[in-house]
Amino acid sequence: MSLLLRNDASTHWRKSSDHLDALLRYKKQEIGRANYIYVKVDRNRKQTFQITLNGFKAIKNMEINEGEVLDIRVVLKNQVYSEFDLILRRDLLIADKPVIEMVCHSDLQVYNQDVIEIFLGWDNGSKSNWKGLNSKLKEAWLVACLYWSGLPKLISKRKDFTIDGDLVNSKTDFYCLLGEIFFGHRGYFGQNLDGLTDCLNMIRMDKSDPPTIIFKNFKRLEKTLNKTSKNYANELVNIFENRGFLIMKEIK
């Protein structure tokens, strides 16, 4: 039986992105690509997924049998976000279709549909903000920022950057805010101390005229960050100081 091809009224069937490519490959050769991917877990069968590809363009028409192995490479703004193998649970007909579905078995690990949805929203003009998201979506927001904006290369010429501890309720909040303060909406400045260090290693900065980071309500920020690990806040400050930033702490 060939794979089901359909045009459904459900929301995800009509989505597409100019900056997202889902490449479908067979025996390491690309056989087609789509501009949107939706991965749904089959909760009744372990490691079984239903994968939907929108706007699918086939390189050539062909049929692939149940049990064959394919792989999908998900690319966001020309950067590989995720790549995984899958084993077909149904025959798959490869052809140009508005929507293509496949049911497959996969050991899918590095993939988060929330990242795709956030990225897609931005691509279609969404003005959403991380502050109203739950913790799971904030983590996805940070990953989406990385692929949308890339690693930072230059600090803006403004002299002072103020980080208000009253706006931070978790470590994830802090990195969402940090990227935004330094690089604007969807800016990225790491997701942890190692990631922050990696970003700083990429940045060109005039150390003869260093910027100042003002930590407003530092005691509140310190208490929040130190829930991650003891002295987390001080380690953070030390990283910035070692890179030449001037630090001011406003404590109340």
Image (cartoon, rainbow, N blue to C red):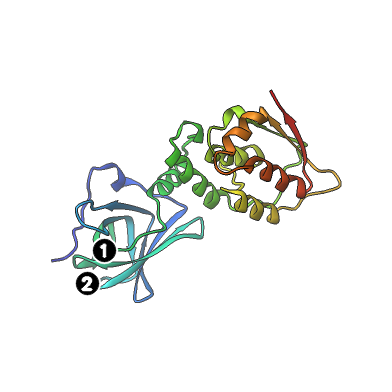
SS for dot 2:
loop
**The image quarter in which residue 47 lies:** bottom left
Where does the image place residue 7, in percent across and percent down from the top left?
22, 50
Nearest to the observer: residue 133 or residue 7: 133
Kindly give the residue lying farthest to the left in the view shown.
1
* Residue 23 in the image, given as x and y percentages of width and height: 39, 64
* Above/below status of 199 relative to 236: below
Dot 1: element: strand
* Amino acid type, callout 1: His
Residue assigned mark 2: 67
Location of residue 46 (image quadrant): bottom left
Classify residue 83 as left or right of residue 43: right
Q: Nearer the viewer, residue 2 or 152?
A: 152
Quarter of the picture holding the C terminus: top right
Position of residue 204 measured from the top left corner of the image (x, y, whole percent): 75, 53
Identify the image quadrant of the N terminus. bottom left
Q: Is 18 on the left or on the right of 46, as rendered?
A: right
Front position in the image: 160 or 62:
160
Q: Residue 213's quadrant in the figure?
A: top right
- How far apart in space, not on screen, are marks 2 and 1 (Cα)? 9 Å
Residue 5's disc is none
Q: Residue at x 62, y 47 (%)?
A: 189
Please determine whether, in this image, residue 167 is positioned above or below residue 187. above
| Image position, residue 115 (x, y; %) | 43, 48
Left or right side of 143 for 70: left
Q: Residue under circle 1? A: 105
Q: Can residue 60 be seen in the rendering of this structure? A: yes
Tell me the amino acid under the disc marked 2.
Gly
Using the image, determine if residue 90 lies above or below residue 247.
below
Task: Name the residue: 18% across, 65% down.
Answer: 90
